[in-house]
Amino acid sequence: MRKLIIIKYGELTTKKGNINLFINTLSKNIKAYLNEYSYEEKHDAGRMFIIPEDNDYDEILDILKHVFGLHEINLGYETKTKDLDSLGNEILELLKDKDFATFKVQTKRSDKTYPINSMDISRKMGGIILKNIPNLKVDVNNPEIIVNIEIRKDFSYFYFDVIDGLGGYPVGVAGKGLLMLSGGIDSPVAGYMAIKRGVKLEAVYFESPPHTSDQAKDKVLKLAKKLALYNNTYLKVHVINFTPIQEAILKNIPHEYLITIMRRMMYRISKRIALMENCKILVNGESIGQVASQTLNSMSVINHVVDIPVIRPVACLDKLEIIDIAKKIDTYETSILPFIDCCTIFVPDHPVINPELSKCEEYETLIPYEDMIKDAIKNKEVIKVELKEQNNHSDLL
């Protein structure tokens, strides 16, 4: 009998002919997360097994909780015996140290050549446990412990401790996307939701010194590190100095159109960075109707300047739903720190909520935005925000 970690894939098993791509990507991602650990990895139908060389189970289990593509994580045991009495003795050896009053047994028999079916295995094992541990009761609805048994071709497995995985797809299996990351609540949540669908993210952040502070930038980098926890250990952030463009807009554009034109410029810059970095989509935290630039008409006019898909994962969530997710992924407390970003400075009293495309195009002729965009991209700062503690001070690329 040896201790090991059993990983169940969940949704990945529906991929049929493409499953090897998903499993290979997941294996590669796990290696990135566990690069400081020595372990053996092996596979069986619908399962991955991690066997640490040292006693690092708790640390590895905690890391795997943040890896997308895992449906369930189990701390379990592998044994070559398929004799139920011998298997029962091994299970009893581990149960005797646990404090519980109710239990149930559930069995999965993937080896269909095994002569006893799953229900009979569960009944037999339940009888062995009741006979050898006094004062126990079977509770099929709400047991304190579930004894899970899997009978496979060459081995039997059993486990009691079940950890829910994050689900989703392995990061990178869907390609790359560029997240328009601000210091607010919505964009980190949107990034998390995109990562869950297998999108490997980079991010773009627009700063406007001296109108925005270093604290605002540090806040965004803290959010980037929270996302790096899910984004396969790091997040590359492209920092754009937006001050010249923003001041030109403020000086030359009618004030009710400031936000609309500003967002169109951000989209233009984001699209160009996305193409440079082989990102197939833009991702942002826009939510329908939340602010003036997020009415359907505003989004349509703003979106008009790009010809790559723009994914808005939180578009149909209300603010409380978004906040719930932000708290779950530990970005909320950072997002509400009182440091303004360039999206919240120079906000007019009455921004247009139904902008006209023709007016936007007319007003934009008043500023030399093409040259300014080229300069902003040429002089951008790129910061690789890494998960590892020793890399708290982000490396400038």
Image (cartoon, helix red, strand yellow):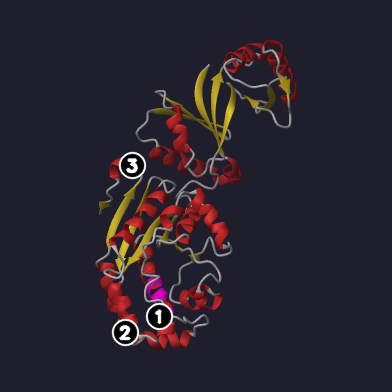
Q: Earlier in the sequence, mark 2 or mark 3?
A: 2
Q: Say which of 265 and 393 sits in front.
A: 393
Other residues around mark 1 within 10 Å, as few (<14) / some (14–19) / many (≥20): many
Q: Tag 2, which secondary structure?
A: helix
Q: Tag 3, which secondary structure?
A: loop
Q: Earlier in the sequence, mark 3 or mark 1?
A: 1
Q: Say which of 380 and 262 sits in front.
A: 262
Q: Which mark is residue 251?
A: 2
Q: Which mark is residue 381?
A: none
What residue sits right under mark 3 in the picture? 388
Q: Distance of mark 2 from mark 3, alpha carbons? A: 43 Å
Which range is magenta? 260-267
As drawn, which residue projects farthest toward the front?
A: 338
Query: Which x, y percent locates residue 220?
Result: 36, 58
Q: Distance of mark 3 from mark 1, alpha carbons? A: 40 Å
Secondary structure mostly seen in magenta is helix
Residue flagged by tag 3: what amino acid is it? Lys
Viewed as shown, does residue 234 lie left or right of 326? left
What residue sits right under mark 1 in the picture? 258
Residue at the image point whose x is 73% and y is 32% from the top: 141
Q: Is residue 113 visible?
A: no
Residue flagged by tag 2: what amino acid is it? Lys
